[in-house]
Amino acid sequence: MTVVWINGAFGAGKTTTARELIDLIPNSTLFDPEVIGGALPYLLPPKRLAEAGDFQDLPIWRRLVIDTAAALLAELGGTLVVPMTLLRQEYRDEIFGGLAARRIPVRHVLLAPGETILRERIAAREVPPDLPDGEIRIRQWSYDHIEPYHVALASWLTADAHPVDNGVLTPRQTAARIAEAVGSGAVAVCDIVQTPEPTAETVAAGVLLFDERDRVLLVDPTYKPGWEFPGGVVEPGEAPARAGVREVLEETGIRLDDLPRLLVVDWERPTPPAYGGLRLLFDGGRLDATAVAGLLLPGPELRAWRFVTEEEAAGLLPPVRYERLRWALRARERGAALYLEAGVPTTE
């Protein structure tokens, strides 16, 4: 079972290409996530819909795309061809990581015609005649997304996906080129750690590492949105502090000689479909310039690292994770560990 995700700007020809591609890849099925977007007005109140400028900004859409793709593959097997624009890297991480957690590999293809051709296709796009102001709104929507597309190209998209310039190709020719690239292995499986989703509460250990300016190290996972601390899930029979040491070595190449000191224990409440559990943060100490210079990202789990101030971390970490960091820094200053529930200390 696999997913071939066809990405590209609006007007790149994703859907017409996908329809041709399912004739060329044996045992393949078309899944258009636009169907999920079309169902949301029947599932969510208008007020909630109005809060999002795009249905991709709704967490329920991203979750339903993952769950529906997994359900279709469980039902039908084979290959799922998915034509969908993804321009925000954090949404790519969430969706592709969610599929990887279900042991579903993703092959990511980018249709990349030139901007002039894109604009010509948008101008010629058919619009439903019964849609009020549809011609203006739909075409303008597509034009407005050309700039975000260029931003994604410059920052991550080209490096992540296999590009196909279909500017002078018909949809059938484009599909044939994709089918050949998929069959030959030229379109590689996205290098994402395929960690199965938890089936019960978990214990996770993170380690705070500091540079000589007392900034804290954060890492950027490929398989989920938002930055994180080095660390991971504690294996059965493993001591949490030693799990943190192991994860730091695996993720950064840094070997900690001493067991880190506990800073916080945070209980993360179950929020379906997540199970929650205990999240521990340890103090791994200050790294000298030599250790920082030798910092590596040896595996496919992480794409980047950086040292940040507490204020900078607020813009990178999800809210609960940031609160965990904030209280861990206070515990480090005081020299006493804290117990938290959902990022909030029960006593100070």
Image (cartoon, helix red, strand yellow):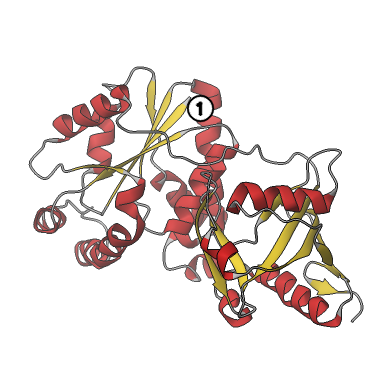
Judge by depth and name the residue closer to the eye, 191 or 97: 191
Rendered image quadrant of residue 116: bottom left
- Horizontal side of residue 281 vs 335, given as left or right: left
Q: Position of residue 144 (x, y in %)?
A: 25, 68
| Residue found 83% across the figure and 64% down from its top | 261
- At x 53%, y 42%, the residue is 66
As drawn, the residue found furthest toward the top would be 26
Q: Is residue 179 left or right of residue 57?
A: left
Tell me which amino acid carries mark 1.
Leu
Name the quadrant of the C terminus. bottom right
Note whether residue 119 is visible.
yes
Toward which corner of the image does residue 260 lie, by quadrant?
bottom right
Give how far across and how far down residue 38 sits, in percent. 43, 50
Viewer can see residue 274: no
Image quarter for residue 31? Answer: top left
> Going 27% across and 22% down the picture, which residue do you hit?
23
Which residue lies most toward the right here? 347
Q: Is residue 45 above or below residue 254?
A: below
Residue drawn at (23%, 36%), measured in percent from left and top?
17
* Residue hosting label 1: 73
